[in-house]
Image (cartoon, grey):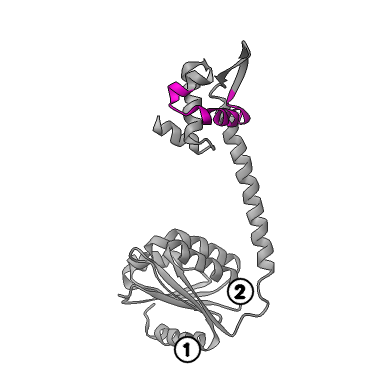
Amino acid sequence: MEEIQEILSKIGLTKQESTVYLSLLELQEAQTGVLCKFTKIASSNIYQILDSLIKKGLVSFRMQNNIKVFMSSPPDSLNELFLEKQKKLDLERKEIAKLVSNLKRKELEEEPQSNYKYYEGLVGIKSMWHEINSRMSKDTPLKAYTAKKESYQRMVGFYSEHHKLRKNKQIKEKLIFPNEDISLAKKRKDKLTEIKFMDLKNDAEWGVIGNKIYIQYITGDKPRGFLINDKTFAKTFTQVFDQLWKSATS
């Protein structure tokens, strides 16, 4: 029963609505007194539950000696509820997409001279990368100093989407990869991507893109990241990266 109720909850039925509907399926038809006894639901609640099920198309009734006798609709009616929920989700998805598009238009034309944002959790790190992706342009190549192999494995699938977007925007990239992951690095190499290798043991990684610096680590239970917008910091980190690039091996 609990497993079925859990499934029915996914199409909008409460636990008590599921109990009444399933009970009517078993009883075939019943008056409220019988239903209350069978389901152990108080009579003060039963009419509200039945009214909700009627509105959802899962229960109907007939009059017998001026008394309502309730019956369940066929289980196929549950499909209709699912389709209604799907339509609602599709509409909400379109509304969210429209909202995101409108909000992007309202972004600041000129960013503050210096600011930073802190992100926490794997979802937070992905949010940081969504912002990085939205700011990428041909004039801002990405320079990334990665970390040891296990430090970015949880994000490999997400990074694949990032690289697709980067390639669509024709954005160049320089990556310093750990020696232990040469095979994966070679798969990423293309006309827009240059890769070199170092003996990396660090858990955290960082990179520079335009006037922005990101610093992150995604190992452990609480991944964390910073996205810093500061010309001076970005210039300094770019110089550090360029020095490391010279000593890295191809």
Name which residue lies at 41% across and 70% down: 224
Residue 51 counted in the magenta span: yes
Indicate the quadrant containing the C terminus: top left, top right, bottom left or bottom right.
bottom left
Q: In the visual, does 116 lie left or right of 57?
A: left
Specify the segment rendered in magenta.
Answer: 36-59
- Provide the secondary structure element on which disc 2 rests: loop
Q: Quadrant of residue 149?
A: bottom left
Give the residue type at disc 1. Answer: Thr
Q: Nearer the viewer, mark 2 or mark 1?
A: 1
Using a 10 Å C-alpha cutoff, classify the residue at mark 2 as few (fewer than 14 neighbours), some (14 to 19) or many (20 or more). Answer: some
* The quarter of the displayed image where residue 175 is located: bottom left
Task: State whether residue 244 appears in this view.
Answer: yes
The residue identified by callout 2 is 137
**Vertical side of 154 occupied by 205: above or below:** below
Q: Position of residue 110 (x, y in %)?
A: 66, 80
Q: Is residue 179 left or right of 20 when viewed as pictured?
A: left
Placement of 47 over or under 101, stated as above or below:
above
Quadrant for the N terminus in the image:
top left
The vertical placement of 78 against 94, above or below, is above
Question: Which image quadrant for residue 204?
Answer: bottom left
- Residue 238 place in picture, x, y as percent: 48, 85
Sequence-wise, the earlier of marks 2 and 1 is 2
State the residue position of label 1.
236
Q: Residues within 10 Å of mark 1 (few under 14, many from 20)?
A: few
Which residue lies at the image location 60% right of the left edge and 21% below the top edge? Answer: 60
Q: How many marks?
A: 2
**Looking at the picture, how far across and down is residue 77, in whole percent?**
58, 26
Please indicate whether residue 145 sits to the left or right of residue 91 in the image.
left
- Residue type beneath disc 2: Ser
Judged by its main secondary structure, the magenta piece is: helix
In the picture, measured across the screen, residue 189 lies left or right of residue 222, that is: right
- Which residue is painted at 43% across and 26% down in the image? 40
